[in-house]
Image (cartoon, rainbow, N blue to C red):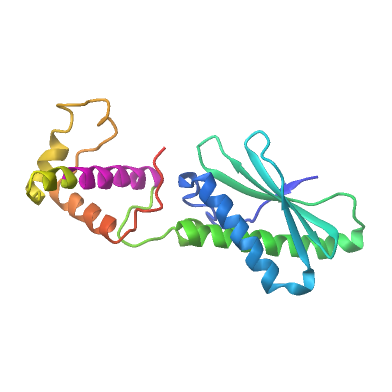
C-alpha cells in the first residue's frame, strides 16, 4: 500500500497551526456531507481507534473497500491528511477507485481548509502570511485582551499608548510567562487589535 496526497502549490499552508480535535470534527462532517451528496456510492465510513497518534477511517462503497483516510500529527505539531488504497484490486477497478478516493480526499481537505482558514483559505487580508508571525500576533492579541480585562476591573479602559508601554515593558513581574511576547509599536498593535476584533486570529493555534 502507498500513501498519496494532493499535489498543488503550497496546498497545506497553515496546516502546522491546526488542532487535531478540530480536524477530526471536520473530517467527520465532510464524510457525512460527501455521503449525502453522492448517494449512488452508498458510502459507509468506520472510524478506528487511534494508534500511535494516527486516526483512520475505513471507507467502503457499495459494500466494497474503497480506501483508508488518515489523520496524523507531524513533527512540527501540525496535521497531515493522507489516503491509502488496497493493492488487492484488479487493474480495471484501480482506475475507478483511485478517482473516487482522490475526489473524497480533496473534499475532506477543502472542508478542513474552510473550517480552519488554512490551505486554500490561508490568504486572509490584514494578517501576516508566515505561520510564526501569525502565532506571535495571536499571543499578542491574547495579551491585549487580558490587559484590557485587568484595566476594566480597575474601572478604566487602556489607551493605545498604555498598550504600547505594556508591550515595551512586559518582563517586570513574570519573565517566564511573557517570554514569547514580542515588542510591538503603535502601528502594529493597531493592526493586531483590528485583526483580533475581526476574528481573523481565531484559528491560529499557539504551540
Which residue is drawn at the image coordinates 48% and 47% (left, top)? 18
Which residue is drawn at the image coordinates 46% and 50% (left, top)? 14
Which residue is drawn at the image coordinates 38% and 53% (left, top)? 129
Question: For residue 66, what is the image quadrant?
Answer: bottom right
Q: Is residue 188 left or right of residue 120?
A: left
- Quadrant (top left/top right/bottom left/bottom right) for the N terminus: top right
| Residue 138 is one of the magenta-drawn residues | yes
Q: In the rendering, at what x and y percent does residue 70 appear?
A: 67, 47
State the predominant SS element of the stretch in magenta.
helix
Q: In the rendering, at what x and y percent does residue 148 appear?
A: 16, 47
| Residue 97 is one of the magenta-drawn residues | no
Q: In the rendering, at what x and y percent does residue 72 appear?
A: 61, 42
Q: Is residue 149 left or right of residue 31?
A: left
Above or below for 87 versus 167:
below
Question: For residue 62, what is the image quadrant?
Answer: bottom right
Magenta stretch: give its range.
Answer: 131-147
Q: Is residue 64 left or right of residue 44?
A: right
State the residue in front, 26 or 66. Answer: 26
Q: Is residue 39 left or right of residue 115?
A: right
Q: In the rendering, at what x and y percent does residue 29 appear?
A: 59, 61
Number of numbered discs overlaid on the protein picture = 0
- Quadrant (top left/top right/bottom left/bottom right) for the C terminus: top left
Above or below for 100 versus 129:
below
Above or below for 202 versus 207:
below
Which residue is drawn at the image coordinates 13% and 45% (left, top)? 153
Amino acid at each position: 500500500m502507498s500513501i498519496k496526497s494532493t499535489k498543488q502549490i503550497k496546498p497545506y499552508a497553515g496546516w502546522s497551526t491546526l488542532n487535531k480535535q478540530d480536524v477530526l470534527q471536520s473530517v467527520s462532517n465532510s464524510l457525512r456531507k460527501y455521503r449525502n451528496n453522492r448517494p449512488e456510492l452508498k458510502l459507509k465510513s468506520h472510524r478506528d481507534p487511534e494508534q500511535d497518534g494516527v486516526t483512520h477511517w475505513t471507507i467502503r462503497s457499495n459494500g466494497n473497500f474503497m480506501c483508508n483516510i488518515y489523520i496524523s500529527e507531524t513533527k512540527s505539531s501540525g496535521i497531515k491528511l493522507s489516503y491509502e488504497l488496497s493493492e488487492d484490486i484488479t487493474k480495471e477497478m484501480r482506475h475507478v477507485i483511485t478517482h473516487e478516493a482522490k475526489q473524497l480526499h480533496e473534499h475532506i481537505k477543502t472542508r478542513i481548509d474552510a473550517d480552519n482558514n488554512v490551505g486554500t483559505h490561508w490568504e486572509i487580508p490584514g494578517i501576516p502570511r508566515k505561520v510564526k508571525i501569525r502565532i506571535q500576533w495571536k499571543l499578542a492579541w491574547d495579551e491585549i485582551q487580558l490587559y484590557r480585562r485587568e484595566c476594566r476591573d480597575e474601572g478604566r479602559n487602556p489607551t493605545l499608548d498604555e498598550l504600547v508601554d505594556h508591550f515595551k515593558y512586559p518582563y517586570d513581574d513574570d519573565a517566564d510567562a511573557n517570554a514569547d511576547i514580542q515588542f510591538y509599536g503603535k502601528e502594529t498593535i493597531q493592526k493586531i487589535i483590528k485583526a483580533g476584533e475581526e476574528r481573523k486570529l481565531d484559528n491560529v493555534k499557539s504551540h
